[in-house]
Amino acid sequence: MTDDSTRPSAVIASFRPPAALADLVALLARDCDVVVVDDGSGPRSDAVYEAAAVAGADVVRHAENRGIAHALNVGVERALSSGAAAVFTFDQDSAPPTDFVGRMSDALSRARESSSSVAAIVPEFFADTAQSRGADIAPGLCRARKVIQSGMLVPREAWSALGTLRDDYFIDLVDTEFEMRALTRGWEVLAARGVSMPHSLGRTVRLSLAPGLHITTSVSTPFRYFYRARNRVVFSRSYVRRAPVRVLTDAGVDLAYFVVSVLGARPRRALAQIVARGLSAGFRGTMGRLPDRLATVAEGVRWSGVEVSRDGAAE
């Protein structure tokens, strides 16, 4: 259990959540004050949210879907207004271990002993993917890179100095932008050694790009490619002068990923249209939700290959 005087809050962004949301709330409520924000799920999710409230959450319902960044911001502001000294952010399908909050809170305490500018603490591993880089800079702590917001712990002073998440991004690269904003303002983003966040990273598919040419990669829900393309452009234009190597390298990786995804999509022209519209919106600075007509196009996109497990075996 955490000390009541330093008890953090946890914010869970949700959209049409599974019944297991109540289990996540119950686990976190042992050590946190929990805020669940509904991002426009509608009445069919009423029972799930009622169960989350019974499990200990302060549930905030919204009628409109405005994106994960907006949902998290609403929860963060609610937690801070209630006096939270630090706030975790989580997805609805996060699966933190029972000791996660305690270990992350201990890591934040250690970090504060060596630095007055700690923007965030993240677990060393997210779904077996390392978020750490370099040697330890304090006991059990190292610098982090390419962090994912689920399981991230941000102290109150960082929220106050840096601001909340960019809700005009809607979804995708929201955490990347917050990380870069912190780093370019002289704050530190650190990883807690030995702490893991089990989590799904979406589908892994062996795509057929051409006769005899296959590649195994992760794929997103097709509409997400609009946001990822647009936000990559906006992010790159915002930070390329301050961090050119990282920004240009990551942009190149994403561009290659878009090409592979388009080649593996059916019909290809549909996903190509989604990516192109996203890139165009980024250069124009058009933010917010993707157009409804493009969402309809995304609903018709399928993948050409077979789904595989993370070790490459067909399922």
Image (cartoon, rainbow, N blue to C red):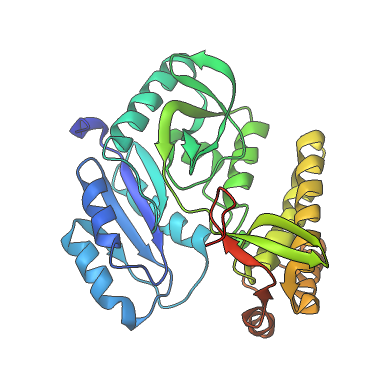
Residue 230 in view (yes/no): no
The correct choice, above or below, for 230 with respect to 242 in the image is: below
Can you give x and y, in whole percent of width and height, for residue 201 in the image?
53, 53
Question: Is residue 46 at least partly visible in the picture?
Answer: yes
State left or right for residue 177 relative to residue 127. right
224 left or right of 59 in image:
right
Q: Residue 239 lies in what quarter of the image? A: top right
Res. 258 image quadrant: bottom right
Q: 137 or 78: which is nearer to us?
A: 137
- In this rendering, is residue 280 above or below 11? below
Task: Where is residue 229? Give x, y as percent.
Answer: 73, 61
Residue 132 in the image, given as x and y percentages of width and height: 56, 29
Asked whether 257 or 251 is in front, the reply is: 257
| Furthest residue in direction left, as rendered | 54
The residue drawn where x is 40% and y is 31% is 195
Look at 66% across and 78% down and name the residue there.
298
In the rendered view, does 95 fall on the left or right side of 271? left
Question: Which of the pair 23/303 is nearer the observer?
Answer: 303
Closest to the observer, 306 or 86: 306
What residue is shown at x 45% (from left), y 27% (from top)?
192
Q: For the N terminus, which image quadrant?
A: top left
